Image: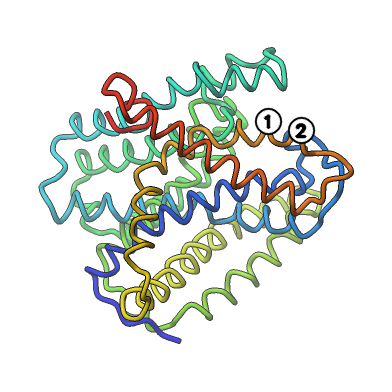
Amino acid sequence: MSVKVDKSFELSMMSPLKITMMLLVVLYHSCVMWAGEGWFDKPAVQCVQLGILAIWLNTFHVAAFVFASGYLYSYLRRETGHYGTIVSVLTKKAKRLLLPYAAISVLWAAPIYALFFGSDDLIWKFAFAASPSQLWFLPMLYWCFVVLELVRVLLPDLVERPLKLLLYAVGISFVAPIVSALVGNILQLASAFQYLPVFCAGYAFRAGETRRFWSIGPLFWIIVDLVLFFVWSNVECAEGFAPSIISNIILLPLRLAGCAVALSVLGALGLFIKNGFRNWRMLNRVARILESNSLGVYLFHQQIIFFVLSKLNIPSAPPMVVATACFFISMTISIGLSEILSLSKRTKWIVGKG
């Protein structure tokens, strides 16, 4: 089924896309213990289905958020006067991304990490942002803005040619394993190189003609995504240098296919809600709460899941019940903490509202 949208409606879908991906990040962390990656602890009861779900979500939930960020950056930078000089843009993004990173690292994530896992590598993980739990996303996204702003200043013609910019970003992404091998993922630079093509894809999507994309419909993108996921997951499990290279090559198309699935499905749902859903006002109220607290949920949810798992990861608790409890308890408490911090001018900057 094709979806007929214009650029205005497409723009309006970016906020729901970011909200949905935030929910999927929480769902991912609620299920990832069963993915066999040693996250938090070994599950008391195995559940292959939850593990597969977590691995699949991990191929696109962050990517789609980065895509939406690139899309909105393209709109605000190229079509409005919202963004000023490079200094003003990066200062605003630092307040939105890096200040919450610093505050939550010191006050929340690092202490709770030390409580569960010890403090031996705390400085490397959090002060150098090498592996700061869920907070890695914040410096990674900041570097994407830094790169695009530098390109705009130093190579202004390139930002006016989004597809060429995207090709350069794909080339840069192959530097990520080299950077990681040399200095580790310090300051999330390697991760930024990996996700830069996705950011630029969102930038190009806003700048280009997208009617053909919407005319294809969600089913095609779902099939493409599932085929790529099947191939990638099998190659990823294989040992050796060649499978590792092939896996890294497939991963970017897989992430972009996941972005296409998320956007096309939400576009179809958005039209349904707009044209025929009777309770859209109530849905809008829920969406506003989630949008207002999306960063707060991201900042707090993983450590709450640690506490839930420390109590519920027992043989008598069914995995589906544990994962569901992790999701709803972490969502509820995270939103509550975000709302409380938002009440005061002295603390609302912690959740990116200052």
**Residue 139 to residue 288: above or below:** above
* Quadrant of residue 316 within the rendered picture: top right
Q: Position of residue 231 (x, y in %)?
A: 70, 66
Q: Residue at x 59, y 31 (%)?
A: 133
Quadrant of the rendering where the N terminus is positioned: bottom left
Query: How far separated are the C-alphas under marks 1 and 2?
Result: 7 Å
Three-letter amino acid code of the residue under disc 2: Lys
In the drawing, does residue 58 fall left or right of residue 159? Answer: right
The residue that disc 1 covers is 307
View extreme (left): residue: 81
Q: State the residue in front, 332 or 348.
A: 332
**Dot 1 alpha-carbon crowd within 10 angstroms: few under 14, some 14 to 19, many 20 or more:** some
Disc 2: which residue: 311
The residue closer to the viewer here, 147 or 341, is 341
Residue 42's x, y, as percent? 83, 38
Whether pointer 1 and pointer 2 mark residues with C-beta atoms closer than 8 Å, the reply is: yes
Q: Secondary structure at mark 1?
A: helix
Q: Position of residue 218 (x, y in %)?
A: 48, 77
**91 up-or-down from 314: above or below:** above
Residue 224 placement, left or right of 15: right
**Looking at the picture, does residue 46 appear above or below residue 1?**
above
Quadrant in the rendering for residue 302: top right
Query: In the rendered structure, which amino acid carries the disc numbered 1?
Result: Phe
